[in-house]
Image (tube, rainbow, N blue to C red):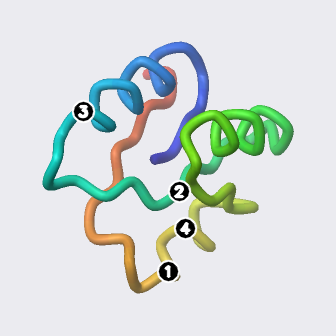
Amino acid sequence: MVGCGRFGEFCLGAFATVPSLALIGVTDRDRRRAEATAGAFGVAAYSDYEALLADPRVQVVAINTPP
């Protein structure tokens, strides 16, 4: 997931309830926020979206940034 603000956390909470979905990781411009969100959901924190996209386990990316 890209974007770890309030909406991103809301979405991660919803995604975590889907049994067939494996959460992989998050990224955010604010590295500390990404790390905190990753820790709360037990996923990886990526340094940027390019690193997230480079992970072969990632098949779908939710973009939760401000419009």
Mark 4 = which residue? 52
Q: Are marks 2 and 1 in contact (CB under 8 Å)?
A: yes
Tell me the SS state at disc 3: loop
Mark 1 = which residue? 55
Tell me the SS state at disc 2: strand
- Among the 4 quarters of the image, the one containing residue 45: bottom right
Residue 55 in percent (x, y) is at 49, 80
Of marks 3 and 4, which one's residue comes earlier in the chain?
Answer: 3
Mark 2 = which residue? 25
Residue type, mark 4 in image: Leu
Q: Nearer the viewer, residue 50 or 31?
A: 31
Residue 22 in percent (x, y) is at 31, 58
Q: Nearer the viewer, residue 29 or 18?
A: 18
Dot 3 crowding, Cα within 10 Å, few <14, some 14–19, many 20+: few
Q: Return the residue found at the far right.
A: 32
Alpha carbons under labels 2 and 3: distance apart: 16 Å
Q: Are marks 4 and 1 in contact (CB under 8 Å)?
A: yes
Of marks 1 and 3, which one's residue comes earlier in the chain?
Answer: 3
Residue at left 45%, top 61%? 24
Alpha carbons under labels 4 and 2: distance apart: 7 Å
Above or below, 22 against 66 in this view is: below
Q: Nearer the viewer, residue 66 or 17?
A: 17
Q: Nearer the viewer, residue 7 or 66?
A: 7
Mark 3 = which residue? 17
Residue type, mark 2 in image: Gly
Dot 1 crowding, Cα within 10 Å, few <14, some 14–19, many 20+: few
Tell me the SS state at disc 4: helix
